[in-house]
Image: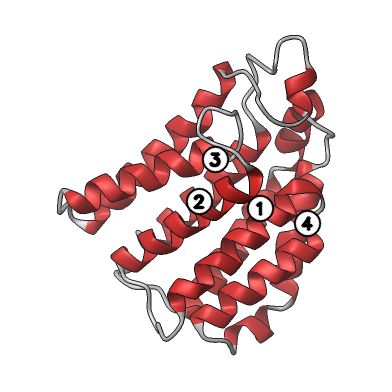
Amino acid sequence: MKNVLNTKDVVKVLKIIAKRIEENKDYITDLDAILGDGDHWANMNMGYQKIVSIEEELLELNLADLFKKVGMTLMSTIGGSSGVLYGDAFITAHKSLIGVEEMDKFKIHEVLDSGLNAMMKRGNAKPGDKTMIDTLYQAVKAYKESLDNNDEFEITINKMVKAAEEGMESTKEMEAAKGRAFYRTDKGVGHIDPGAVTMYYQIQELAQYIML
């Protein structure tokens, strides 16, 4: 169980996430072919593989600069709205890491929460719109409630992952309020949002790393 995360840890998590996304090409692409342009996996994979390619550079940075660099890289590499949203989330989060060498459980929440708010603001999105926000919002909400309850960190992480999964699954029965799925006759009802899935992968891999 890791109680704090430093630059080395974050880079390791990013590499693990990159591998998870890379391995799920067919599933994500099939989902997005139904609801979107069919390019969500390709864009996310391109962004995270770029992160992997600059690993050595990232390892030399402090946490704040690391997050800023990751944000700028994702924003310039990932196509479509996802690049802007992820880029803005990391860049916004870096502000809360200035002067911080390690993230404890409270700082991790602060980073996730600032990223969530940045995504909602930039994308003009909210929970219930059938997007990646539905996964992240539920995860951050459960995390905060667990912190307020003074739960052990392990319990907090488990609650976060469970809530993220529930948020992801909930998009299946939602009507899309954003993107191409909005223009479908069925508004995408019956299909999980691919962005919600890749967001879940990231939260799950972060959690699993912390629990090692």
Taking the image as drawn, is residue 1 in sight? no
Q: Which residue is drawn at 50% across and 80% down?
A: 63
Which of the 4 quarters of the picture holds residue 24? Answer: top right
Q: Residue 116 carries which label?
A: 2
Question: Which of marks 2 and 1 precedes in the sequence?
Answer: 1
Is the Cβ of the residue at disc 3 closer than 8 Å to that at disc 2? yes
| Kind of residue sitting beneath label 2 | Leu
Q: Which of marks 2 and 4 is in front?
A: 2
Cα gap from disc 3 to disc 2, whole angstroms: 7 Å
Few, some or many residues within 10 Å of mark 1 (<14, 14–19, 20+) = many
> Label 1's element?
helix
Q: Which residue is drawn at 38% across and 79% down?
A: 102
Task: Give the residue number, with chain letter if any, for mark 3.
Answer: 133
Q: Residue 78 carries which label?
A: 4
Q: Residue at x 46, y 82 (%)?
A: 98
Q: Which mark is residue 85?
A: 1
